[in-house]
Amino acid sequence: MYIWSPWRGCRRVSEGCRFCYIHKGDAKRGVDTGSIIKNDDTFYAPVAVKKDGAYKMRAGSTVYVCFSSDFLIEEADRWRRECWEIIKERNDLNFLFLTKRIERFADNVPSDWDDGYDNVTVGCTVEDQGAADRRLAVFDDLPIKHKNIIASPMIGPIDLEGHLKDVELVVVGGEQDKDARPLDYDWVLRIRDQCVISNVRFQFRQCGTHFIIDGNVTKVPPYQQGAVARKMAVDL
C-alpha cells in the first residue's frame, strides 16, 4: 500500500469537512490548507524508478491518491491531466481516490476513459442524507468500473437504497474531534442491512469520538475508535 499526494491543500465544501484532520494538522504547523493548494514534490512518485530501472512502487499494490486533498478540486485542474497519464502508465497499480466533488468527475477524465480504467477505484464521500442525495444522484450514472461509497464522517442517518447498484464497497465511520457530532450504531446497522440485501461489501471503519449504542453515548479516544468498530464484528 502506498499514499500518493500529487498536491496538497483543500477547501471545505460541506458539513463533513468541519473537523477535517488535514486542516487541523496543518493549522498546528501554521499552514493555511484552504488558501494554499500546490503540487507536491512527490508528484511523480508512481513512476519513480530505482537504480536498476525498476519502479519503486511494487506492481499489484494499492495507491491511495490525494488523501490530503481532493483529486477533483478545481485548483488542481492544471495538474490532473498529467496525473491521469501517470495512472495510465502504471496500469499494474490499483489507484483509489475519494471525492466530495463528484459532480466534476465527468468533465475531468481523460479522452480514452470510456467506461473507466480497470486500475482506478473512485469513492464518493457522503456525510448525511442531503449529501448522499446530491452526490449519489450523480455517482450512480458515472462510467466507473470500481465504485465505493464512503459514509464518513457520518453525521446523520443515511439511506443508500437505490444507490448500491455496481458499488463494490461501502465504508462507514464516525467523526473524530472533541466537538464531533455523534454516530448512532443504529445508523451503521441500517446501512449494513442494505448492503446485505444488495450483496455489497461493508466495512465499519471507526466509531468516531461520540458513539451511541442503545441510546447511550460513549466517548472514545482516537486510538481506540478503529478497535471499537472492529469489535462490533459487522464487516461483510
Image (cartoon, helix red, strand yellow):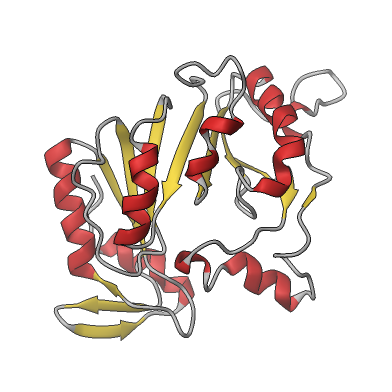
Residue 118 lies left or right of residue 129; in this view the side is: right
> What x and y, as percent, mark residue 85?
70, 22
Residue 123 lies left or right of residue 216; in this view the side is: right
Foreground of the two, 222 or 215:
215
> What x and y, as percent, mark residue 81?
71, 28
Foreground of the two, 129 or 117:
129
> What x and y, as percent, mark residue 26?
72, 70
Residue ID at (84%, 45%) = 41
**Quadrant position of residue 190:** bottom left
Foreground of the two, 127 or 57:
127
Q: Is residue 205 visible?
A: no
Above or below residue 48? Residue 118 is above
Residue ID at (53%, 36%) = 105
Residue ID at (31%, 52%) = 133
Foreground of the two, 188 or 9:
9
Q: Quadrant of the C terminus?
A: top left
Residue 19 lies left or right of residue 58; in this view the side is: left
Q: Is residue 144 visible?
A: yes
Above or below residue 35? Residue 77 is above
